[in-house]
Amino acid sequence: MYYIKSEESFDAAHFLKKYEGKCGNIHGHRWRVVASICGRQLKSEGNAEGMVLDFSELKDVLKELCERFDHKMIYETDSLKEKTVSALTDEGFLLTEVPFKPTAENFAKYFFDELKQRGYAAHRVEVYETPKNCAIYED
């Protein structure tokens, strides 16, 4: 089996509703996303000949996925009052709602699933909240 991996990052704020501790407050991270793609065979023609996938293609798709969250506040559906969302939006803040608790574990699965849905043979996705702490989802 062949593997390639690439990484991208984004800066974003989040909070964990019903969490007792610091992470219950709005705070930010430089989220680092490392994705591994696998393949049993290498491409046999075109620009990607001899490759599992052209690195530039993987970099581009990761960048696109990360840009959805870059410099935004990420919040779980129903974790903020409607008037809070409205007030923040009226102030010009960029918000992104997700249907899951915005933990590194859930983001790892989110990025994994997004790659799979786009037809990539995702093997593993690592999401770092800090340089020393990451969550992994793999097939």
Image: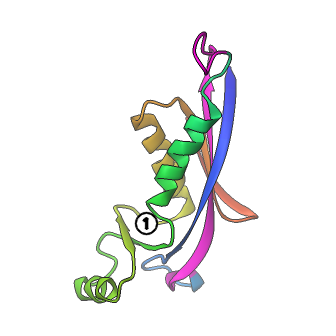
Picture layout, residue 118 above or below residue 67: above
Could you tell me which residue is drawn at 61 percent across and 27 percent down? 38
Instruction: Residue 71 in the image: state x and y as whole percent.
Output: 50, 72
Q: Is residue 131 left or right of residue 73?
A: right
Q: Is residue 51 left or right of residue 122?
A: right
Could you tell me which residue is drawn at 64 percent across and 35 percent down? 55
Q: Quick one: label 1, few (<14), some, or many (20+) residues within 10 Å?
A: some
Count all numbered tags in the image, as a single digit: 1
Which is more toward the observer, 98 or 96?
96
Amino acid type, callout 1? Lys
- Residue range (magenta): 23-49
Q: Where, by quadrant of the figure, is residue 23 drawn? A: bottom right
Instruction: Residue 42 in the image: state x and y as whole percent.
Output: 64, 15
Q: Quadrant of the N terminus?
A: top right
Disc 1 marks which residue? 101
Please tell me whether mark 1 sits on a helix, a strand or a loop.
loop
Picture layout, residue 107 above or below residue 118: below
Any part of residue 138 in sight: no
Q: Is residue 39 magenta?
A: yes
Any part of residue 127 in sight: yes
Instruction: Residue 19 in the image: state x and y as whole percent.
Output: 49, 79
Q: Is residue 97 magenta?
A: no
Which is more toward the observer, 3 or 20?
3
Q: Quadrant of the C terminus?
A: top right
Q: Where, by quadrant of the figure, is residue 128 drawn? A: bottom right
Q: Is residue 65 left or right of residue 91?
A: right
The residue most toward the right is: 132
Give the color scheme: rainbow, by chain, secondary structure or one colour. Answer: rainbow
Picture layout, residue 130 above or below residue 20: above
Could you tell me which residue is drawn at 51 percent across and 86 percent down? 25
Could you tell me which residue is drawn at 61 percent across and 29 percent down? 54
